Amino acid sequence: MRRNFAFLLGAVAGAGLTVLVMGPQGAHLVAVAKAATRADTYAQIQLFGSVFERIKTSYVEKPDDSRMMEGAISGMMSALDPHSRYMNEKGWRDMQEATHGEFGGLGIEITMEDSLVKVVTPIDDTPAARAGILSGDVITQIDDEPVSGLTLEQAVSRMKGPANSKIRLKISRKGSAAPIDLAIQREIIRVRPVRYHTDGGDVGYIRITRFNEQTTDGLKKAISGISKQIAPDQLAGYVIDLRNNPGGLLDQAVSVSSAFLNRGEVVSTRGRIAEETQRFAARGGDLTKGKPLVVLINGGSASASEIVAGALRDHKRATLIGTRSFGKGSVQTIIPLGPGNGALALTTARYFTPSGRSIQAQGIAPDLEVLQDVPEELKGRSEMKGEASMRGHLAAHGAKQTSGSQSWVPPSGKDDKALNAAFNLLRGVTVNANAPVVAKRAVAN
C-alpha cells in the first residue's frame, strides 16, 4: 500500500470501440466535449473560490482558513468511495504508527458507515478487547462529546492518546435496549500480528490479526516454532485463522501468501489505465513444504485477508472454512502531499484473485460454511454487514453484490465450531457428509 499504483477496469474494451467508429468529425466532437468538461470544472472551481472568499469576509467570526480548507478537502474525498480519505499531518502520522505496529490507544479498528463510527474489530489482547467491545458496535460519544459530525481521522485521533490516560466511550449495540458506557485506560498498543500454538501434537494453529510491517516476520517465526514442536512426519497441517482480520499492507498480503506457495500469481491490481495493471507473484517458496492448509474466514475478514484467502484457494493450496468474507476488494494508494500537508488515501484499483475474480462487494464464500452457535444475548448482532452495505462503495465487477456474514468468534476454542471443523478436516475426520470433496482436497494438498 505504500507503493504507487494506478489501475484500470473496463476501459480497454471501451477504447477499442471508440477507435473503430471514430472518424475526423467524431474526434472533433470528442475534443469539444472534453473542452466543455474542462470549462465546467473551472467554473466549479471559481464557484468554490467565491464561496471561500464570501465566508472569509462575511462570516460572523473570523474563520480559520486552514480548517476550512481541510474540511473542503475532506468533503471532496467523501464524494468518492468510503475508503478514500484525506489525512491531515497528524492523521498521516497516526497511520504510519499503525502500519509500523506500535501506538498509544485502545486497540480498535473502526470504519465510517452511514456517518456512524462503527467497530470493525477489536485487536486481540488490547484494552478494547478486554473491555468487551464487539465487531459491529457503534461509538456514539467519546469523552461525553458526540461523534456525529467527526471525520474518521478525527474519531481515531480522539481515541488515541498517552498510555495510562483514560477515555470514556458510549456505545450503541444492536439488540441492547440502552447505550453501553465504558471507561477504558489507554495502553501502548504493540500490535503483535501473529500468534501460534499447536493442537494435539499434530496440528499447527496460526492466527494473523492484521497485515502490518511485522506480519511476515511473525509468520515465519510461527512456522519455525511449530516445526520445532511437531516432527514433520507427525504434522497433519496448519490452520491459518484470518477471522476478523481487517487487512492492512498489500505487500504483506503478497509475502504471507508466498509463504505457502512455490510459484504463481498472488493478486493483480487493475484501475483506470490498462497499461498500469500490476501482477504480484509468489516469491521465496513454500515454507510449510506442502503441508495441508485450512484457512478460517468470516464476515470480518477484509482486504489483505481476502487477498491471501483468494490466492490460496485459487491455487488449490487451502480449504476455506467459516462464513463469507467482508468484500473489500479495492486498493488504496497512500499519496503524501508534502511537509505539513498530510496525505491522501485514494482508491486507485480493484484487486483480482489469480483466477481473475474480483472480490469487491462480493467477498469470498468458504468451501465449507460453518455457522457458530451464538449465545442468546448476542443474537441479532453477530453479523458484519459487509462492503456492499457501505454507502458509496464501488460496485461489484460483473457479478451480483452480496452483503452480510456472521463475524462472531467464540472466546473458548472448545465452542468454536469452525476451528474444530478445521482440526477434524486436517485429521481426516469427515466434517460434512454433503461435502466429501472438500474433505478429500484438504487432506490431499
Image (cartoon, rainbow, N blue to C red):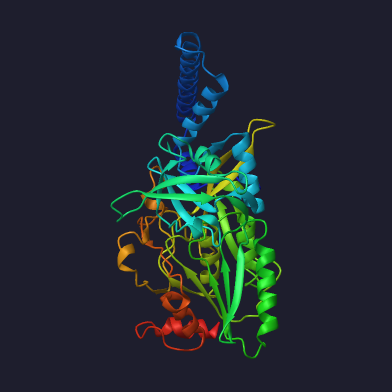
The image quadrant that residue 267 belongs to is bottom right
Q: Position of residue 383 (x, y in %)?
A: 36, 60
Quarter of the image containing the C terminus?
A: bottom right
Q: Is residue 82 above or below residue 412?
A: above
Q: Is residue 384 above or below residue 394?
A: below
In this rendered view, identify the residue nearer to me: 351 or 409. 409
Q: Position of residue 366 (x, y in %)?
A: 43, 70
- Horizontally, residue 395 falls left or right of residue 379, namely right
In this rendered view, identify the residue nearer to me: 333 or 339. 339
Q: Position of residue 206 (x, y in %)?
A: 58, 72
Residue 361 shows in the view: yes
The residue under the point 43% across, 74% down is 367
Q: Is residue 261 above or below residue 57?
A: below
The residue under the point 63% across, 72% down is 261
Residue 1 shows in the view: no
Q: Residue furthest bottom?
A: 233
In this rendered view, identify the residue nearer to me: 241 or 273. 241
In this rendered view, identify the residue nearer to me: 431 or 266. 431
Q: Position of residue 158 (x, y in %)?
A: 53, 40
- Horizontally, residue 160 falls left or right of residue 18, namely right
The image quadrant that residue 238 belongs to is bottom right
